[in-house]
Image (tube, rainbow, N blue to C red):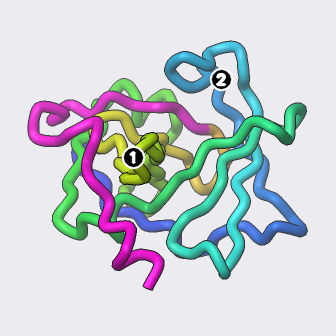
Amino acid sequence: MTSAESTLSQPASTTAPNVVRLPLGLLGFEQIKEYALLADPAEKPFAWLRVTNDKSLAFVVIDPFVVMPEYKPNIPPADAEFLGIKEASDALLLGIVTIHKDHHATMNLKGPVVINRHSHIGKQVIIANAAEYSVEHLLPIAEAVA
């Protein structure tokens, strides 16, 4: 698979979380392997990737295609094989959001979390065309909240 074009079309509800297994963890959180993907319609387009055994630890995530429709991440073949992704429609991509002290927010487009929609196995992937994107892509907060 060379390009992914998936979206967060069916977010999890807060009452029945989708459990996602990240065998390699997230960068900087390699020891944490199991997360729940939670979405509240009132917080759309944002969702939460929350650690299942520590409810106090969660990451804000967003479908990168909502913010940047022209996003064309090139998923390396080894990562697609590791995740069992054969087609773009098999993949759910999430950008991890960082909320900075001055209240602006950015999203990591170089290292999205890629999840197999069928097996719920995921991995934070450094895309092959990472040089084209930023780890701090500015989010239009006012537009997203409005």
**Location of residue 132 with respect to 6 vertically, above or below:** above
Task: Give 40 or 3, whichever is nearer the viewer.
Answer: 40
Q: Residues within 10 Å of mark 1 (few under 14, many from 20)?
A: few
**Location of residue 132 with respect to 4 vertically, above or below:** above
Q: Quadrant of the C terminus?
A: bottom left
**Location of residue 54 with respect to 61 vertically, above or below:** above
Q: Which residue lies furthest to the front in this view?
A: 102
Residue at 72% over, 60% down? 38
Give the residue number, with chain letter if any, for mark 1: 102
Indicate the secondary structure of the residue bearing disc 1: loop
Q: In the visual, does 94 lie left or right of 26?
A: left
Residue at 72% over, 25% down? 33
Give the magenta part as a residue range: 122-146
First in sequence: mark 1 or mark 2? 2
Disc number for residue 128 = none
Give the residue number, with chain letter if any, for mark 2: 23
- Indicate the position of residue 18 as horizontal and vertical percent values: 77, 56
Indicate the secondary structure of the residue bearing disc 2: loop
Q: In the visual, does 44 lie left or right of 98?
A: right
Q: Does the magenta stretch include residue 144?
A: yes
Which amino acid type is marked by label 1? Asp
Q: Which is closer to the viewer, label 1 or label 2?
A: 1
The answer to whether the residue labelled 1 contacts the one labelled 2, judged by CB atoms less than 8 Å apart, is: no
**Location of residue 38 with respect to 24 vertically, above or below:** below
- Indicate the position of residue 40 as horizontal and vertical percent values: 71, 73
